[in-house]
Amino acid sequence: MTDYTEIDFSPLSALSGDEVVTHSPVSDIRLPSGMVLALITLDNGRDHTRPNTLGPATLTELGATLDTLQKRADAGEIDAVGITGKQYILAAGADLSDITKVDSRDTARLVAQLGHHVLGRLSDLGVPSFAFVNGLALGGGLEIALNSTYRTVDASAAAIALPEVFLGIIPGWGGAYLLPNLIGIENALEVVISNPLKQNRMLKPQQAFDYGIVDAIFPAANFLEDSLRWADAVLGGRKVERKNEPGKIERLTKWPIAIKMARGMLESKIGTVPRSPYVALDLLDKAKSGTKADGFAREDEALADLVVGDQFAASMYAFDLVQKRAKRPVGAPDKALAKKVTKVGVIGAGLMASQFALLFVRKLQVPVLITDLDQARVDKGVAYIHDEIGKLEAKGRLDADTANRLRALVTGTTDKTLYADCDFVIEAVFEEVGVKQAVFAEIEAVVAEDAILATNTSSLSVEEIGATLAHPERLVGFHFFNPVAVMPLIEVVTTPKTSEAALSTAFVVAKGLGKNAVLTADAPGFVVNRLLAKVMGEAARAVYEGTPVAEVEKAFAPLGLPMGPFQLIDLVGWKVAAHVQDTMVRAFPNRFYANENFHALAELSEVVEKDKSGRVTGFTKAAEKVLKGQVGDSPASAETILARVQDGLAQEIRIMLDEKVVPAVEDIDLCLILGAGWPFIDGGASPYLDREGASERVFGDTFHHPPIRGVASRG
């Protein structure tokens, strides 16, 4: 058993040079019964846009505070300890900027041990401890609560989660042991593993209460007063029910079955390359037996291993891109230049156009007009939008008044003169230059001279689409990803003629829609589709050589993408994929693979067969008929296929940087993370390609200087 009091934590002081220290002042509160609760309020002295975080200096100060409180408890001066945070925030977890400076496994272990030493004290003060979760509680913030004896939550708290697995590590300050023993293994698997892997899903306070993570939930208006009254009742003997706490039978029977099922699910969904979900799974498995000290010691070793590993280093690079670079897009003009958008026009009323209209009306809450060739299509589009608003209302995401107001803001017509007062008009029509030019010519004759026009083309030249406009400077590329409501990326495409006002408006609108915008030049496929076309093309090449579809899908697994290439093609649509491949082959015939049979396959209603988990297992009989006589008898090995796609991506990214398609390689990685689901543990494509040696093989160098720690090329 580790005696944390005997450990020298002084080496961690080197990590806290830039730390914004979260202080732990204490105030004594006399409860209605006359008992005294010493209340710690975590506060970093900044406004609520800078959350409390837990770095070495913060933990050391909190540890000293708890030492003092234990002495006071021993002396009979206090009857309980409470811990809460400044307004809206308990704590957002460990100070990750500190952890990235860790230089050895021994230092990484000290980070885990210091957290256990300090937070573990909350259950060992000689008096009960109460965590009053008054706001955001992530990672170490939630582990403060888990280490306390009792917990309450503010019903308006922003989010509660253990997101560590998303970042390539594990809950290492008690979460992996304490949570399953508090709420049962199945609930713990959801919180620790499933939610982080679902785009880092968080819990709302009511969910945390339903799971049993917290013992009581109170409205924001009197949260602290209600919590203190509740704590007083508990101290006076009120029983706290914990219905999800696992009993002997669950530990013996349900626990191992749940772990086995979770392992199978992980293997089928994410493969075996990501380390942290499996390390977390092992810790949760072992939490069913042994002491808390054993559990904490296991977390110490697991966190030490992961923090110095390449997947965490890459994750932190990706996290930095998403948290910082995405919020301040490189190349975005001054937002003061943006045109105020008071009405939006959407050309088209099909599914994609209707999804746009729904997003614009929900997020911008301005009038949205949709048009199409005939009234029946328009009515269908409006009905879809109204229906989706109804679903949100039924789920409680919108109240009745808001839902009715949003419905009233959406109108549809075949009369394009009604676009006259639109400030921002986006097209979602057939992916052909001539068609897009024709609709824009019609609209330009109607709208004001300073109205912004946007095209959602996925791979066509924006400049060519605008070539027939009287004012091509007003046209900007505004490329969404499917599904529109979920995918966080918009590629904002500029041409040599695009005005600063049009670009600025596009960035401001994207932010208003809750999306991250990345600036890209007007190059074929822009960023995401250009690189996915490389992935899909290499998959097609392998099939035409004679490699079975299932083997090709397996060969791509080490890339860590959310799905294999044919599953991806099936999702985006075979017609769309064939069109993108055609565009890329026409632009770069020597670098992109395509086959005319793709168009024949694209005409089929079903092209691939899948198993129960949704994995592609082969082609349908109809597809095999189309391919008959076209497939060779020289199947490629998995190693060959993977090396070809790695080298192809490294080559294409290098060319895109030389051509200044984006300002820097970080923007390519950001696009792939946000638009293609490239995993955080790879850090996007470029650190992965450096690590695998593809950058060195293709252009004799690496993308990153110095290479991202642990993600450098093998040479």
Image (spheres, rainbow, N blue to C red):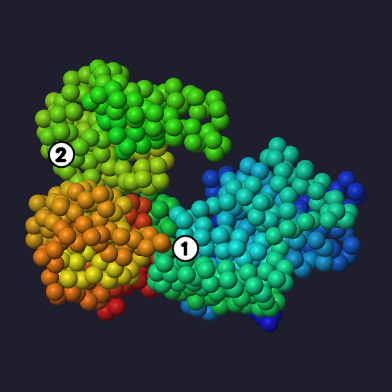
Q: Nearer the viewer, mark 1 or mark 2?
A: 2
Image check: 91 left or right of 236?
left
Circles 1 and 2, Cβ within 8 Å, touching? The answer is no
Against 315, residue 497 (above or below) is above
Quadrant assignment for the C terminus: bottom left
Q: Picture quarter containing residue 156? A: top right
Q: Residue shown at 61%/76% (left/top)?
A: 286
Residue 420 at x, y percent in the picture: 27, 18
Mark 1–mark 2 Cα distance, whole angstroms, equals 41 Å
Quadrant assignment for the N terminus: bottom right
Out of 537 and 334, give the one closest to the viewer.
537
| Mark identifier at residue 432 | 2
Which amino acid does the dot numbered 1 rest on?
A: Leu
Which amino acid does the dot numbered 2 rest on?
A: Glu
Q: Residue shown at 15%/42% (left/top)?
A: 461
| Mark identifier at residue 167 | 1
Element carrying mark 2: loop
Q: Is residue 528 visible?
A: no
Which class describes the residues within 10 Å of circle 2: few (<14), some (14-19), or many (20+)?
Answer: few
Q: Earlier in the sequence, mark 1 or mark 2?
A: 1
Q: Is residue 602 visible?
A: yes
Against 487, residue 689 (above or below) is below
Residue 428 at x, y percent in the picture: 26, 35
Q: Picture quarter containing residue 627? A: bottom left
Image check: 308 left or right of 447?
right
Against 553, residue 401 (above or below) is above
